[in-house]
Amino acid sequence: MSGVLVIFFLLAGLAVLGAVSLILQSHPIHSALSLILVMVSLAGLYLLMGAEFIAAVQIIVYGGAVMVLFIFVIMLLNAGVEERTNFSKMATFGGVPLALALGGIIAAGIARSSSQLAAPVAAQGELTSTRDLSKLLFSEFVYPFELTSFLILVAILGAIVLAQREN
Amino acid sequence: MPILENLWIIPLLPLLGSAINGLFGAKWSKTIVNSVALGSTGISFLCAVEAVREFLGYYETSHKAWVKPFFDWIVAGGFRAGFDLQLDHLTVVMLLVVTGVGFLIHIYSTGYMAHEEGYYRFFSYLNLFMFFMLILVLAANYVLLFVGWEGVGLCSYLLIGFYYLRKSASDAGNKAFIVNRIGDFGFMLGMFLLFRTFHSLDFATVFAAAARPEVAVEPMGHFGVLTIACLLLFVGATGKSAQLPLYVWLPDAMEGPTPVSALIHAATMVTAGVYMVARSHVLFTHAPTAMYVVAIVGCATAFFAATIGLVQSDIKKVLAYSTVSQLGYMFLACGVGAFGAGIFHLMTHAFFKALLFLSAGSVIHAMGGEQDMWNMGGLGKKIRTTFLCMLFGTIAIAGFPPFAAFFSKDSILFSAYNYPENGKAFYAVGLFAAILTSFYMFRLIWLTFAGEKRYDEHKVHVHESPLNMTGPLMVLAFLSLTGGWFAAPALWGGKDYFAEFLSPVFGAGEAGGGEAAQSLEHILSAVAVLAATAGLLVAWRMYSKTVKRGTSEGVHKLLYNKYYVDELYAAVVVRPLMWLSTNVLWKVVDSGMIDGAVNGVADGAAAVGDTLRHTQSGNTRSYAVWVVVGAMVLLGIIFWPILHPALFGGVR
Amino acid sequence: MVPTSYYLVLSAILFGLGVVAFVFKRNIITLFMAIELMLNAVNLAFVAFSQALGKPDGEVFVLFVIVVAAAEAAVGLGIIILTARNRRSLNVEHVDLLKL
């Protein structure tokens, strides 16, 4: 059992714990904090895989911006403990079996094709440099890049419009 | 040859007359309606005469029938049925009879229908009838003939039910059309069989193909293709020409106005069956079994109808049964192979039967609408012209020389006598029917015109009919006298001009046959005249003096009630069909299955909608579940190549 | 030396848990967080493949996913605020105006 594997299982366990906690908590703020836990562990996993830039972005953007936004909103809306209503028969009876089935299909898919994935790649442990990433980003993916900036602009405008009071 | 090139003008003129009168006649005066109706028919008659003249000239040089295709009506695969009109010697006879007698009856109708409601409608229908009848006789293929066939049936229905406010009249119209339809079904089956055999329905093609030497004559008793086709065509003829067992509509058809009875149910429409059989003689001569059947049916009908006519009290009903009986003679002639004689009788019958019906109409008109002979009597002195004309007709139908029917009926009986299979039996029955014919016709004359009057003079104002009615009567009386003279010379060894005229169509069949045949014919003619005289004398004995209506019992009752055939048909055919239609076809098939299916589709759609509606719950969570389901399906499809070895065994 | 399939399994588990959360939670904000969880699971898979194949393309895609998720979160939360003010409830089952 190499060290890397141990760290992997640690971080993976944290992530799963956070996800389970998200489901089981009744107060949304607790769910938010669980989600932050998941994101941080994922950032750790990214680091483990050598994607340092992505790990950083994950923490800064997801953890530092998106989740903060979530918490602001929870506080703003004074969200309380979740009510226990149950209007959807479909969700009650279909939910668990469906989730299991979904998981099963994906698991089976992965398992069956694990032979193709088994060989760990030669570049294990090699970090993906930011330089390579940006080289790719601004050459092959420049068009999607521009589009995403446009998307952000639209989102800002949308948020402003939504937040306006009705005058 | 202007008219021959444009034969269509002969049927088209009455059609135009019908359309104009039908659309505009309601607002016009009688004079205008008359001129349109009479004008179109009259000009059509003149065109027919001219066409005949041109044709005879054409035939001199070419020795062929004149066939002119005008346009393609049905073209389907290799089959072509066109609007083709033809003119040959047989058509000439029919054409002149239809247009000539038709025109005379149109003139008569202007007088008879003068006080009737719907005057314009009558002439519109009558002209329409002329159109269809002319299409029928001019047609050069079975399909167009059938168009005319159906069309005259339609007009018959319209005209029988002319007094549509009377239930008996509209019922009679229905009966005529429906019974005709049964016959038409047979006709259509026959046409289908002919098409299947010859791949065409043009007369020229079919008859040429059937006349080839290699087509064998089917032996008696053997039901080959031609025999069955001919029998089916004959079924159609029994319907249209009122033979056993489909004659039942003709007596009821007397509900229509008398000119209708004269034109349609005596002179022209009912003869369509005979014409059709005569036209198809090439096929029939190859199917002796069919011809034998035709002869039997014709002979039986002649006798059967004559027996019913013996005791009827309505003047028109007597004439109706007489028509059925005479048509039987025509079919007997065709059945024994004497097609020319059959057509000859058709022509003479058109003359004297139209005359009889129109005279009866004149009597009815004089009596203010009375049709029961037991309420007449002694009219001979009061309406002389009508009486004389009717007498002419009666002498003609009884078969006394030198009137027309003597020659034609004689010709038929002679040919029947010489027929190899049971010819003598046919002759005997036909002769007996002739006795009966003479009897009941003279009975009619004496009951109506002789003896003491049996009506109330104060209620009924007997008056002679106007000239536009008596004029045609006199013309027809003249034709009834002279119409048979074409064939007269044959009696003393000369030529039968009529048979010779038709020989291009039928072949030189009845060729005299030498001395023995001649004297046989003389003997048989004499016997026929004796038979007619016997009938006359018996009738004179019984009816010429003062008579009273007796009670009806026993045989008399049976005959008076027409052998209860209508009741039999009602019980055996009509009622079960009505039951079947109501309970099975209507309630089960139509309401249950068809409506059920259509409504079921609608209900099904509604039910499906109702069920699916529940998916639109507005609840995000259930939507989420559906999204997951969809995602799973997609994943399953994508992963299927990887997954399925796992499901079935697991060996990769 | 972590085999790629382990990362994929983890990704699948996280995704499944995200689905479960989405189906079973009633608070709108929590639903949104479940969506974020699912997106993160997918990011993990992308990075794992990127590493397995040795090409940085997967990571570029992760960048885009993160950007889109951020934009979506911003706008989505704005909508949630409006909805919550309107219906005076954060329970998603009370937002059922689309019911037939």
Image: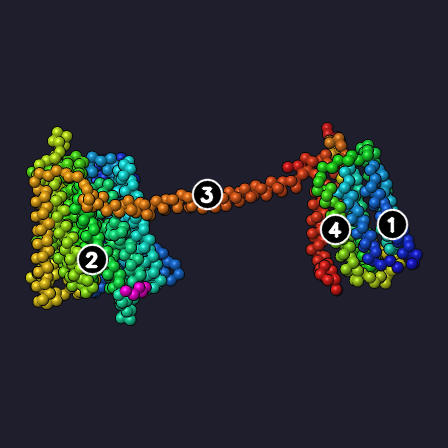
Rendered residue at 12%/49% (across/down) = B438
Q: Nearer the viewer, residue B241 or A141?
A: B241
For the N terminus of chain B, the image quarter is: bottom left
Q: Secondary structure at mark 3?
A: helix
Q: Chain of mark 3?
A: B
Of callouts 2 and 3, the N-terminal one: 2
Rendered residue at 77%/40% (across/down) = C25
Q: Secondary structure at mark 4?
A: helix
Rendered residue at 19%/53% (across/down) = B302
What residue is shown with label 4? A101
What residue is shown with label 3? B591
Q: Residue furthest front?
A: B554
Q: Residue B9 appears at what percent x and percent y? A: 25, 51
What residue is shown with label 1? A13
Distance (Cα) linking label 2 and label 1: 111 Å
Rendered residue at 79%/52% (across/down) = C12
* CA neighbours of label 1 inside 10 A, class few (<14), some (14 to 19), many (20+): some
* CA neighbours of label 3 inside 10 A, class few (<14), some (14 to 19), many (20+): few
Distance (Cα) linking label 1 and label 3: 70 Å
